[in-house]
Image (cartoon, rainbow, N blue to C red):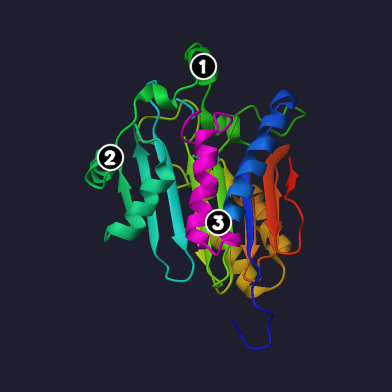
Amino acid sequence: MSRGEPPPGISIIVHGGAWNIPDEAVEAHLQGVRAAVLAGWAVLTAGGTALDAVEAAIRLLEDDPTFDAGRGSFLNAAGEIELDASLMDGTTFRVGAVAAVQNIRHPITLARLVLERSEHVLLAGSGAARFAREHGLEPCRPEDLLVGRELDRWRELQARPDFSTPQAFRVVPSTSLPERPGDTVGAVALDRHGTIVAGTSTGGTPKKMPGRVGDSPLIGAGTYADSAVGGVSCTGWGESIIKVVLAKTVVDRLEARPGDPKGAAAAGIDRLARKVQGLGGVIVLDRQGVPAFAYNTPRMARAFLHAGLAAPICGI
Ligand code: ASP
């Protein structure tokens, strides 16, 4: 904090994916992001850390089958669920991430274990699962993560060899809206110590190749935090988000123009669309705790709450 700035206000923003969320799923998305922001807020108001708040918010979203994270995740082409998650502490620059892990109920908690108990940044696949077991995180059963909606979707997509995720994610220059669903979840929080933490958790994209890793566990792409500037969590077409390093791009813009998180979010999404024809959304908190978001999909589920607000502000 430079001199003369007001002390940071505690603040949290969450998202539950950016896509053409159908009308009948709107209420569930709004309820989900609202509950998550309140869970994180309870931690922050009790004097908890941004790390605890982000983990609490994302765990709730991982438990909610509405979202493509933890329980309710998409199946890959082989009919398996592989999960990605990441967390970054913007004060210490400590980072933890996991990619393509199976049978983990709360990948965000595993990402936190990597952050706190390993000397590495990102663990993948069976090594991540082994690390989980070694640290007392028991594997869940595949059916603990699977919901009927996703089994039906997987069966439907098996009958459509033409369906490819990148195509479904691209901006279609016609009236047709993008068809791919995306319910990745994320959160960014600022605690009373001025620390910003960002986190993201996802089941990836439907019918992805086994072993495919998206932007969500990649620091700089799906998640980034610098307590002196701000924090970001992204959602959308991972292959395109990675190419423009979206989360760090937004933080860099915020560093260049402090006090304009809205402009930074919009500039990031503009770059995503312009450079790689990507679709997606970002949530941002600046170092003062001012929330912002931007997306170029028909809808993005989000909610935020900060000091001075009586209740969360939710939108879709
Ligand atoms: N970004 C996620 C991925 O590509 C998907 C999403 O946000 O919907 O894995």
Q: Residue 182: horizontal and vertical position, in percent?
A: 58, 34
Q: Is residue 254 visible?
A: yes
Residue at x 67% of width, y 43% of height: 34
- CB under 8 Å between discs 3 and 2: no
Name the residue carrying label 2. 129
Label whose residue precedes the other's in the sequence (3 or 2): 3
Q: Which residue is mark 1?
A: 148
Residue at (49%, 67%) from the top-left corner?
Answer: 90
Q: Nearer the viewer, residue 60 or 224?
A: 60
Residue shown at the point (36%, 36%) measured from the top left: 104
Label 1 environment density (alpha carbons within 10 Å; few <14, some 14–19, many ≥20): few
* Circles 2, 1 touching at the beta carbon (< 8 Å): no
Check disc 3: other Cα within 10 Å, few if <14, some if 14-19, many if 20+.
many
Residue 44 point in image, percent of width and height:
58, 60
SS category of the residue bearing label 1: helix
Q: Position of residue 234 (x, y in %)?
A: 57, 49
Left-right relation of 43 to 106: right
Q: What kind of residue is marked 2?
A: Ala
Check disc 3 and give the amino acid type. Val
Residue 244 occupies quadrant: bottom right
Q: Is disc 2 placed on a helix, strand or loop?
A: helix
Q: State which quarter of the image contains the C terminus.
A: top right
Q: CA distance from mark 2 to mark 1?
A: 25 Å
- In the rendered image, residue 308 lying in the magenta stretch gets the answer no
The local secondary structure at tag 3 comes to helix
